[in-house]
């Protein structure tokens, strides 16, 4: 095991290289630039290729092109680039090409604040492209170590599900410095729970079977398989079609290959959830670190507080929120995004509240204040920017 | 069935879904003929397409591997694909004028700058015809379309001393030619040169759209009228064009084939050098 003190950006690079990434095409943007810089330094040394693209759309399209030719590829950006990814993301999703996409969330909307953490792309990462008829796979790390491990996992899932997989990080995770352990032996990798899958090549003539099965290899061009890859609704052989039945089969596969295999993807962390807690905190990414501290602090004070951290943001299981309780969603935005999902899942009679901050983390004290108020049944609206009932 | 079509194209896609009187088939035939004359086989060519008439009608017609990009970004996909493919595979892209000179122009220019080995054939029907006929970036000045009902007022990329091929040459493309679909043998020759250039080649071919362009611009869907209109405006590159005459200047614009190092070749060499240094 190698030990480093480094950033999440470095961890993403190391994870990608370990997973077999050979191509990175991207466009500079704060706070994801260091991922590109690290890739430009490391990739050539391992026989891989770094390409600086003319914009984010080109960055992701070039990465997809490389993957379409059989090389594992990744691209990384932040919010303003992530919206431009909508076009190529849809292409990779519809034509079922594996790719890893990193979004280091900053403060929005639009250019907002570049060097501060935000969580504005919770729903954006679920619907990154137009047209619906899709399920997305999104993983949300909360530490340097975890972003390394999830990058490896993202490559694994993208190959099995043959689709783009998004790592939805935030500026604190990507720019933050922490201890990073990188396994060197197979034993160490297994112990860390890392999973790997090499690229396989679909031989056709059926490239798009009308089923939800995993591990159907993607189309790879250059092997004379007669593969047809496009953004049109495909027939099973890949011909473009306007036949509604073909569209139904296509949509069914895109949706149910994910929905019916949630167990392969789903990850979460639940703490103090065994004794029907009176208050349940919910978060993902960097603020979940504060949430976990707050829950432990509350328990020390004898308060029945539990917490749930989503790691696989999409999909997650509604069952996680089956307890009737007082929920508090803690997010790095003021509009409330994750809270809407909690509200949808929580059983009737539950009370769902929201604490939002943006550009900086909440403090344990602030969350403790929320917990005390919720437990006392006090009016929840202390400050319209921070604290409101849903 | 035509022997070229039988040899290289998928029976499922013949006849093409193009309108009657469309010139696209002539352009595609010339491309396939060039491929045949170079003795290339099905597995030697990977065929990419853009969006619009030119892209949609030619997608998945090639018997080998095919791909269709998002609108205007097929050049970027092809650049990534180039890195992954064996260097001897040819990339042919059939795209429209809107795809290449409008929404995808940035990516096209950067492919020229990088000198990515691909043969782009811009099949130009003088505007956005698959959406019903709106003006584009090569629509002649003053011409009526559905979105220029009073005649177009904007300057374009092919008139008044502006030529899109000059921009591509300055950006670094290494083979450039322009023809009309009436010049079959010349398209074949240019496409052969384009395919033999280890770098970014572009062949710009003007072809008639009878259904939309001719209908609005000339007031007729008679294919002969559109063909005559096109022929009357076709000039050689160095011909003297009468003043004020809208013209399609045809010929080899720029042939710097195999003079600049190709993008992926350069990238592979660069990577090997870094690896040696790292050892």
Image (cartoon, coloured by chain):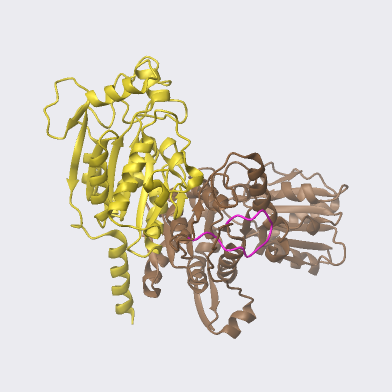
Quadrant showing the N terminus of chain A: bottom right
Q: Is residue A30 above or below residue B53?
A: below
Q: Position of residue B117 (x, y in %)?
A: 30, 56
Principal secondary structure, stretch drawn in magenta: loop
Question: In the rendered image, what is the letter of the chain coloured brown?
Answer: A
In terms of depth relative to the viewer, which is nearer, B215 or B147? B215
Q: Is residue B258 visible?
A: yes
In terms of depth relative to the viewer, which is nearer, A46 or B119? B119
Direction from residue A73 to residue B188 in the image, left or right:
left
Q: Which residues are magenta?
A: A207-220
Q: Position of residue A144 (x, y in %)?
A: 56, 69
Q: Is residue A311 magenta?
A: no
Q: Position of residue B118 (x, y in %)?
A: 32, 53
Direction from residue A340 to residue B128 in the image, left or right:
left
Q: Quadrant of residue B267?
A: bottom left
Q: Quadrant of residue B96?
A: top left
Q: Is residue A219 magenta?
A: yes
Quadrant showing the C terminus of chain A: top right
Q: Is residue A299 above or below residue B104?
A: below
Direction from residue B204 to residue A6 in the image, left or right:
right
Q: Position of residue B182 (x, y in %)?
A: 27, 33
Question: In the rendered image, what is the letter of the chain coloured yellow?
Answer: B
């Amino acid at each position: 095991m190698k030990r480093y003190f480094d950033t999440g950006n470095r961890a993403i690079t190391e994870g990608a290289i370990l997973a077999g990434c050979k191509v990175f095409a991207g466009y500079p943007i704060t706070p994801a630039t260091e991922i590109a810089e690290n890739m430009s330094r490391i990739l050539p040394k391992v026989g891989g290729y770094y390409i600086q693209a003319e914009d984010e759309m080109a960055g992701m399209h070039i990465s997809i092109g490389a993957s379409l030719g059989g090389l594992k590829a990744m691209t990384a950006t932040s919010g303003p680039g992530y919206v431009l990814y909508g076009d190529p993301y849809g292409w990779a999703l519809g034509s079922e090409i594996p790719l890893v996409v990193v979004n280091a969330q900053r403060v929005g909307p639009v250019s907002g604040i570049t060097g501060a953490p935000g969580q504005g792309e919770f729903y954006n990462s679920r619907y990154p492209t137009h047209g619906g008829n899709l399920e997305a796979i999104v993983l949300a790390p909360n530490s340097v170590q975890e972003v390394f491990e999830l990058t490896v996992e993202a490559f694994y899932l993208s190959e099995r599900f043959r689709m783009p997989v998004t790592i939805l990080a935030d500026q604190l995770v990507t720019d933050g410095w922490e201890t990073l352990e990188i396994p060197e032996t197979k034993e160490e990798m297994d112990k860390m729970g890392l999973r790997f899958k090499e690229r396989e090549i679909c031989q056709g003539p059926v490239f798009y079977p009308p089923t939800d099965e995993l591990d159907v290899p993607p189309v790879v061009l250059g092997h004379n398989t007669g593969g047809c890859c496009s953004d049109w609704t495909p027939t099973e052989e890949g011909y473009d079609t306007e036949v509604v039945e073909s569209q139904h089969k296509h949509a069914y596969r895109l949706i149910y290959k994910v929905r019916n295999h949630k167990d392969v993807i789903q990850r979460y962390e639940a703490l103090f959830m065994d004794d029907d807690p009176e208050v349940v905190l919910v978060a993902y990414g960097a603020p979940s670190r504060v949430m976990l501290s707050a829950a432990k602090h509350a328990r020390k004070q004898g308060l029945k507080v539990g917490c749930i951290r989503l790691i696989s943001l999409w999909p997650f299981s509604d069952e996680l929120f089956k307890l009737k309780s007082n929920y508090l969603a803690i997010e790095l935005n003021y509009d409330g995004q994750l809270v809407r999902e909690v509200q949808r899942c929580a059983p009737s009679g539950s009370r769902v509240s929201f604490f939002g901050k943006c550009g900086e983390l909440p403090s344990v004290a602030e969350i403790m204040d929320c917990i005390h108020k919720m437990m006392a049944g006090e009016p929840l609206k202390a400050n319209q920017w921070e604290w409101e009932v849903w | 069935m035509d022997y070229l079509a039988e040899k290289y194209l998928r029976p499922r896609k013949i006849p093409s879904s193009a309108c009657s009187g469309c010139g696209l088939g002539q352009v595609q035939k010339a491309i396939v003929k060039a491929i045949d004359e170079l003795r290339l086989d099905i597995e030697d060519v990977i065929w990419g397409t853009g969006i619009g008439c030119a892209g949609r009608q030619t997608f998945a017609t090639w018997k080998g591997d095919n791909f269709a990009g998002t609108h205007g970004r097929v050049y970027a996909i092809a650049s990534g694909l180039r890195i992954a493919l064996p260097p001897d595979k040819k990339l042919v892209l059939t795209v429209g004028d809107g795809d290449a000179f409008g929404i995808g122009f940035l990516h096209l220019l950067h492919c020229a700058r990088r000198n990515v080995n691909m043969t782009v054939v811009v099949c130009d029907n003088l505007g956005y015809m698959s959406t019903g006929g709106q003006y584009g970036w090569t629509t002649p000045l003053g011409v009526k379309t559905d979105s220029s009902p009073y005649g177009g007022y904007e300057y374009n990329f092919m008139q008044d001393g502006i030529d899109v091929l000059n921009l591509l040459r300055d950006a670094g493309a290494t083979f450039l030619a322009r023809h009309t679909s009436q010049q079959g043998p010349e398209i074949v020759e240019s496409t052969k040169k384009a395919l033999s250039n280890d770098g970014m080649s572009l062949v710009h071919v003007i072809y008639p759209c009878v259904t939309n362009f001719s209908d609005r611009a000339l007031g007729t869907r008679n294919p002969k009228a559109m063909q005559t209109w096109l022929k009357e405006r076709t000039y050689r590159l160095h011909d003297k064009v009468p003043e004020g005459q809208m013209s399609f200047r045809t010929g080899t614009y720029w042939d710097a084939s195999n003079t600049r190092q190709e993008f992926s070749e350069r990238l592979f060499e660069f990577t090997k050098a870094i690896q040696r240094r790292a050892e």
